[in-house]
Image (spheres, helix red, strand yellow):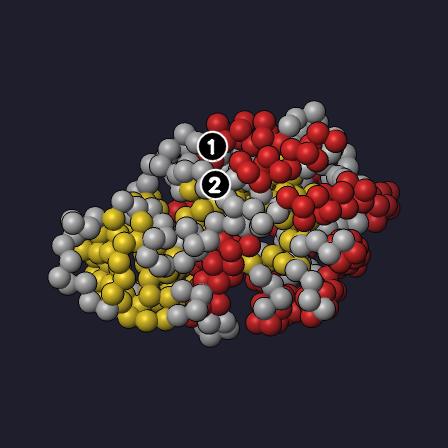
Amino acid sequence: MMDLIIKNGTIITATDTYQGDIAVKDGKIALIGQDLSDVEAKEVIDASGKYVLPGALDAHTHLEMPFGGTTSADSYEAGTRAAACGGVTTVFDFVIQRKGQGLIEAVEARRKLCEPQACVDYAFHTAITDLRPEILEELADSVEYGVPSFKVFTVYKKEGMMVEDGVFTKLLQKSKEVGALIGVHAENPDQIDQRTEEFLAEGKTSAWYHYMSRPEFVEAEAVKRAIHWAKSFDAPLYIVHLACKDGLDEVTRARDEGYEIYAETCPHYLHFTSDVYKREDGRNFVCSPPIKGKESQDALWEGIKRGDIATIATDHCPFQSHEKDWGKDDFTKIPNGCMGVENLYPYMLDAANRGRITFNKAVELCSTNVAKIFGCAPQKGTIAPGSDADIVIYDPNKKFVISKDNMHSDIDHTIWEGVELTGYPVMTFSRGKLVFKDGEFLGTPGHGQFVKRKGRK
Ligand code: DUC
Ligand code: ZN
Ligand code: ZN
């Protein structure tokens, strides 16, 4: 006896589109067939006229992260609740290693916080900020533990998160040996500091100067340098939240030369341009790297079509309006980060619905590639027998206007307010459990499980 059968839907994976029925048992996909009418199940859902997709994996969130003089405003519960309602069935959250902390110690502390709250499954990347010799050795243990991906920041010196080139290159070399993947947040810190100082001295304090203090060339230089190091040591590299054309051109070049370079971008870089920083509420869009000009936006879409952008993730790191307001008269006081975990999949699927990309491509970018790159395929990221029953039922005809009132996180505003989508998820299943239906969250905190991932060896 099956637990669930989803009948008559159009199943869409990264590679295939076909009509079929899916049977679920014990949280896993047990059977897929053209007609499973003869198979007994406790529950049958008719998905006629709907698309049946693998749940998305958001490779980049910052939930309840101490940052910018406060803590990002979505707890693990609120963030994973919003995720479920946007069709995201696995979130990858960033653990920030504090000075003196061990890698697994840092992960376990966050795991403990997350576990009772998580409404969908979760994985972690660890941002390394303190590379002592024993930490370099601990990299292999972390891979073994199920956290085989790490990140370095080339910025956030004052926050104690920035690493020097020596640390970055040691990590790249070690990553090859132990089967880890290093990610990088790439912007030039000296340019940011210098330009910020100049703008403040000139009384240029609006949100626009957040963008002007770290424009296209400030990001591009750091992306190029990061790729230079990855190429020099022939190590794979994942560039998080890539937002600029010149950086992407370098990614394309390196990939054409045969290097294993992955680029992630975010929906806010694909939808908005730097003009948002001229708006009265420009501070709400302040994130780093900032949203760039139209030329970069167009290039990112082209990069998606070419296959040089591997994943779309959100960098979900929201702050409440009153916190964003700290920077009303001084952009340096605006906590950096925007919301997006609930908008990722609907936004990219809307792009598919409009014909900008295919549905298979949207699934590849938001789900399959993430699972493959970060070592949890085929458990996650596809619809196949044996995979977790992380499934989204999508109505391609449903009209949806994003508003803070129909979002499910704890945030009092959204940068996506008023954006109109055609097509929207109507159900999300996390390991066979219905966690979202027709606008309503139906999950439970504590349901989400830690996803133990494999290294690259
Ligand atoms: N950028 C943000 O905007 N927020 C969190 C961290 C980051 O790098
Ligand atoms: Zn970042
Ligand atoms: Zn981030």
Instruction: Tell which of 453 and 444 is nearer to you.
Output: 453
> Can residue 213 be seen from the camera position used here?
no
Q: Residue furthest top?
A: 100
Residue type at mark 1 is Cys
Q: What's the residue at 77%, 34% (across, down)?
A: 158
Q: What's the residue at 43%, 69% (across, down)?
A: 15
Element type where label 1 sits in the image: helix
Left/right of residue 17 with respect to residue 143 in the rendered view: left
Left/right of residue 18 with respect to residue 216 in the rendered view: left
Instruction: State the mark number for residue 114.
Output: 1
365 versus 100 height, above or below: below
Instruction: Tell which of 156 and 113 is nearer to you.
Output: 113
9 versus 97 height, above or below: below
Left/right of residue 215 with respect to residue 336 in the rendered view: right
Q: What's the residue at 69%, 70% (across, down)?
A: 256
Q: What's the residue at 33%, 66% (across, down)?
A: 11
Q: Which residue is mark 2?
A: 452
